[in-house]
Structures are given as C-alpha cells and as structure tokens.
Amino acid sequence: MAKGPTLITIKRAINFGTQLKSFISFMHMILQSLKRYLCTGAIIIFFSLGCQPKSPLTSDILGVTAENAMVVSARKEASAIGLSVMAQGGNAFDAMFATELALAVVYPYAGNLGGGGFMVYRLADGSTGSLDYREMAPSAAHRDMFLDSLGNHDTAKSTLGGGSIAVPGTIKGIFEAHKKFGLLSVEALINPVIELAENGYVVTQKQSERLAQYRDIITQTTGIQTLYTQEINPGDTIKNLALAKTLRQLRDQGQEAFYKGVMAEHMSHYIQAHGGVIQSEDFERYKVYWRDPVSFHYQDLTITSMGPPSSGGICLGQIMGMLESYNLGDLAHNSALYIQHLTEAERRAYADRSHYLGDPDFISIPTQKLLSRSYLDQKMTSFDADWATSSEDISHGPLIGHESDETTHYSIVDPMGNAVSVTTTINGAYGSKLFDPELGFFYNNEMDDFSAKPGTPNMFGLVGGAANAIAPGKRMLSSMTPTIVTRQGQLWQVLGTPGGSTIITTVLQIILNTHHFDMGMQTAVNQPRMHHQWLPDILQFESEGFDAQLLDSLEQKGYKTIQKEHRIIGKVDAIMRHPNGVLEAGADPRGDDTALGF
Ligand code: DON
C-alpha cells in the first residue's frame, strides 16, 4: 500500500522571490478564485509555489499535496495557469487547453503550437478515452525522402529545417478536447496565456543553458536572428509578442485560424522556403482522432495508456505482462537481479515495437495477440538470470505478428475527479530548430520518428521497419505514454514523461516503484532510472544513483552497460491519489518541473 499523508500541512513557505514579479498577477487571480473554496471552511488549502524539492534523486520525500485539484508540468507558470482555470470552475480539459498553450509560451524547448501529442483521460465516472493529435506526414512526403544519392539515411534532412516538419496537431487537439469536454469559454482559457506571452516569463538557469547550447543551430536553420537566438541569461524576462498575436487570432477565430486561410498559407510558404514540402491543403486535411486507449491489468492495477500511433501503451503492456508473474516486490529495488528482469522484458518488447507498430490507419496491428499472456510468457522462456540474452538472438515474436527530455508531459486532476494525462512534443529540442518569427513558435521535426530506412536508427537509436515507413498522410510511430492507473477501481496515478525511446521504460519504473516498493509519487519519481530498448544492445543508466559495483556485476553476466555523465532518463510529471483522497505530486527534480494544487 502506498503511504499517504494524514494531515494536509503547508510544507513550504510561499516564496515569491524577486524573479517572480511577472508571476504575481497569475497568483492573484488564483487566490481570488480560491476564496470560494476557503469560504466553505471545509477545505484546508495546501499551496506550494515554485519551490519544488531539488532533492537528491534517492531521497524519500513527500511531494506537493492537495485535496481537490492539481497540475504538474514542466514550468510553474504553466501549472499556475492550469490550476487557475480549475479554481474558476473549469475542469481538467479546460486546464489542459490552458496548460498546453502556456507551455508553448514558457517552455519553447518542447511546449508547442508547432507539434502534436496524445491525451489519455479518465472521467470521474470511470470511463476512459484518448485523443490522438499526433503530427501527420504531408501529402508530398514519400518513403525515401530522407535518403541520399547512395541510399543512406541523411539524418540532417530528417531532423533539421523544413523537410523534417510534419503537419502540426496541437491546436486542433486542444480545441477538440475543449469542444467535447470543456466548461469555460475559449476566451477565458486563452486570455491569461496571451498576458503571459505579453508580460513575459523569467528564464531559469536550465533554460538559459539549453538556449545557449542550441543558439547556433537555431540561427543557422532559421537563417536570421530571432527571439531565441539573442543572448539570454537566467533571470531575463522573455516576451513573445508574435506568439501573443497568434494566440489572439486563435481566441477570436478558433482553430480554423490555424488550419485554413492566411495562417496556413503563411506556414506552408515559410516551411517550403526552408526546404519543406507541406502545402496549405495539408493543414486543411489534418484531423485528430478519438481512439480507444490500450488497457491492461497488472495484478490489482488497471493501466490505461496510449495506443497506436503511439507504441507506448502496447509496449508498456507487453513489458508488464512479461514481468507480472515474477515477484518483483521480493527483489531488492534496483538490484542487479531486479534490473535484469526489467531489461530482458524491455528488450523483448522493443523488438516487437520495431516490427509490428505504426499508424493503425495504414497497417494492421495485432494488439490482442501482442498483449496476450501466452505470447508474453513464451517470450520470457529464454530469460536466464545467470546470463544476458543477446539482442541479436531476439527478434519480433512469431505471431502468425541519447540524452533527451525534449518532449514534455503534464498531469491534471480536477475537483470533479476527472484526470487528464498529456504528453506533447516537437520531437527534438526546439524541434526542427526552425523558428517562425511571425507566429512566435518552433516547428517540430517529427518526421524523424518515421523509419527513414529499414534497419537504420532514428535520433533515439530506435530501429524500425516497413510498418513505420513514411507515407503521405501517415502518422509516425511514437513512444509517448500518457498513462492513468487505477487500483481496485479507484483513480491511483496520472503519469507520463518525455525521453524519446526511454519514455515507456520510465513510466514502467514509476509504476513498479509505487506498486511493489510502496513509494509515494515524489519518491518514486526521484529514484534513479535505467533503460534498455533491444537495439542498440546496451543497458543504460542515469549518471547518479547506480554504483560501479552494480554495473560490474551486470557486465559479468554479459550486459553491455553505459553510464554517461549528466545522463538523465525521463522527466516525469505525475499525480498519485492516496487512499485518503489526497493528491500527491511527483514533479521531477531533473528539470524545473512544478506541482501546484488546492
Ligand atoms: O513521439 C515520440 O516518441 C518522440 N517524438 C518523443 C520525443 C521526445 O520524447 C523528446 N525527448 N526526448
């Protein structure tokens, strides 16, 4: 059983600090709205602001807690806007709309208008669903578009500039989610985001370092100096007036403003001028899909996650299915034997991912068979605790079937008990590195998630095949794994992470940490993480939290291990609902991630 707090206490003082001046107006708005709750006298408010524990990864720590509602995201401003929406009577879907746009303002590294994502939800009545707003290949895309004259994969083409861009889905995604479930007006949701873009946000140390790291490549790709290529220091305030203008158009004209007419014309011309092939009709053709999520059981848990075109749900289901019959809770957490179990299941699942998974509107995916117990048990019969299986000896089953955190995830629970789990991305850091100075955002480089050439790895080292080959109008296979876990029928966890190919194994480790090792959410998130993805046949570790002796013992059993300096795996933003109803956040100390709740 997970530990839960018995008392809701104010754990950390509200610390506005001089840096947070521009933030005060949001907080004022939230506090005004919170009065309603205070007046009931029934609710003690816990509120923590921008002071997430920057604790060592292994510490045992209770995350931010709240009684009613919570947002955990990559930035405090985005969490605050999402929370303020709920304090005004909005639900988790309203909060999603506002949080997603706020991330586009304050977290251009991954937050976006120029990308796409997936949302998994669970309503208070227990019903679940998912929304696919993944980007789509343009109609002029073709299978070999990233091959050079010798037939080799030209990785620059699939990752940089116009050619790497797929038709963005984010705006349609959030508008559709709002249309189906939202309570507040679009205007009420966008206005605070416009203010944020106009008044600016304060750059953190981490942000400034990242911008410095990518400044030259952004300048080269965009061809001119733009907002994000000036020298930007920690503490500087960035105002994005172009983005504020774009947001005003969306507020006044709705999603059509993005997918039809002047803006779509502009985007297609701009992308073509930078080597891309997207036409304005591609924007008009873009659709989002409400899809059945992938749902499976693990002991007394029910896990609901994203189905194709994300590999997340199926792959997570396969790994957990392979592990279920081993008593992982009896093994020491992160011991060699524990890590072997995870590695061998991960290796086997990723081999299937590579062969079977892709866009379900283009290929047929044997989901039931891939998740069937007999198939998964069969795959683990070759597991030998004394010696590593070689990835060369593993291929997809006979079914007769780098350091990165550049995506972003946010988790929301609203006062009505609805939960929303969203992972959104422009793929690489600052996507294609192509910034649109007129509209104020970066475009994705999601085309690299396709398999450009069978057998050659993409930027995450993932090797794909025909199932994920490029085709016009097709969606590229993703690893994004927005997930919701229930236990004995009750909402237990809302979670997800960025991290490319490591997303699935990161989500896995959080669920196992909480389920088998009784960790609360923040403690689970803080634990060091490992990853294996079949190919390359390398067992990766974060730089902190695994000692040389452990790695040696795995090497002696035939595992090729790697532990790079400064390597982090994933950046989880999660919520756990404790049995007493209290929400506990897990905001990853690996980033600037922040939980806010009331
Ligand atoms: O959809 C995917 O799987 C990738 N585009 C996600 C990219 C990501 O997580 C970037 N951060 N590492």
Image (spheres, grey):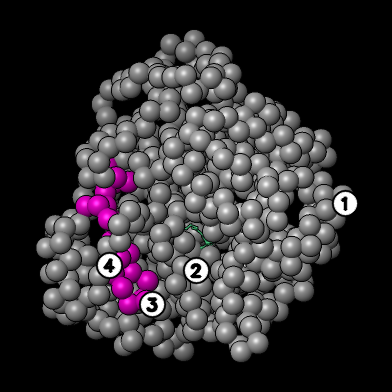
Residue shown at 57%/29% (left/top)? Answer: 237
Residue under label 4 = 562
Q: Nearer the viewer, mark 1 or mark 2?
A: 2
Residue 535 circle label: 3
Residue 459 circle label: 2
In the image: residue 88, left or right of residue 355? right
User: At numbered mark 1, what does the secondary structure look like: helix, strand or loop?
Assistant: loop
Residue shown at 49%/10% (left/top)? Answer: 39
Residue 460 picture location, percent across and down: 46, 68
Residue 247 in view (yes/no)? no
In the image: residue 272, left or right of residue 509? right
Residue under label 1 = 261
User: At numbered mark 2, what does the secondary structure look like: helix, strand or loop?
Assistant: loop
Q: Is the N terminus in the top left, top right, bottom left or bottom right quadrant?
A: top left
The local crowd at label 1, few if under 14, some if 14 to 19, many if 20 or more residues have their Cα within 10 Å, is some
Could you tell me the amino acid type at mark 3?
A: Leu
Q: Distance between the residues labelled 4 and 2?
A: 18 Å
Q: Distance between the residues labelled 3 and 2?
A: 13 Å
Q: Distance between the residues labelled 3 and 1?
A: 44 Å
Of marks 3 and 2, which one's residue comes earlier in the chain?
Answer: 2
Identify the image quadrant of residue 55.
top left
Q: How far apart are marks 1 and 4 (CA)?
A: 50 Å
The chief SS type of the magenta part is loop
Of marks 3 and 1, which one's residue comes earlier in the chain?
Answer: 1
User: At numbered mark 4, what does the secondary structure look like: helix, strand or loop?
Assistant: strand
Give the magenta-colored segment's residue range. 523-545
Could you tell me the amino acid type at mark 2?
A: Met
